[in-house]
């Protein structure tokens, strides 16, 4: 489970598309819709770096 009190590198390096606030944050950060973000995570996994590289193609 995603704990907002337990923040740090593991929490910042992964995207949890099951959390609405994370969907909102990352979709705004990458300037994409939530659906595109979900598709990217489905394609390459939850790593922020991998998702960013996928979206920049």
Image: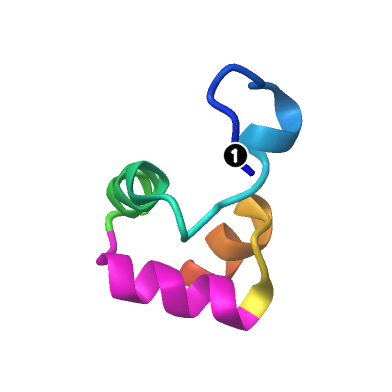
Q: Quadrant of residue 2?
A: top right
Percent position of residue 49, x then y: 66, 53
Q: Main secondary structure of the magenta part?
A: helix
Classify the position of the N terminus by image quarter: top right
Residue 23: x, y in percent?
37, 53
Query: Where are the magenta residues, as a range?
Result: 32-43
> Is residue 32 or residue 3 the one in the foreground?
3
Residue sitting nearer the eye, 39 or 6: 6
Q: Residue furthest front?
A: 1
* Residue 8 image-quadrant placement: top right
Q: Nearer the viewer, residue 18 or 33?
A: 18
Residue farthest along the top direction in this orientation: 5
Residue 46 part of the magenta segment: no
Q: Position of residue 26 (x, y in %)?
A: 40, 48
Q: Quadrant of residue 44?
A: bottom right
Q: Nearer the viewer, residue 49 or 38?
A: 38
Disc 1 marks which residue? 2
44 to 18, vertically: above or below: below
At x 67% / y 41%, what residue is drawn?
13
Q: Taking the image as drawn, is residue 36 in sight? A: yes
Mark 1, other Cα within 10 Å: few <14 / some 14–19 / many ≥20: few
Residue at (74% x, 35% y) in the render:
10
């Amino acid at each position: 489970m995603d704990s907002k009190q337990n923040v740090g590198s593991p929490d910042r390096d992964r995207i949890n598309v099951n959390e609405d606030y994370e969907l909102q944050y990352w979709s705004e950060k990458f300037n994409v819709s939530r659906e595109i973000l979900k598709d990217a995570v489905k394609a390459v996994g939850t790593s922020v770096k991998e998702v960013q590289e996928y979206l920049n193609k």
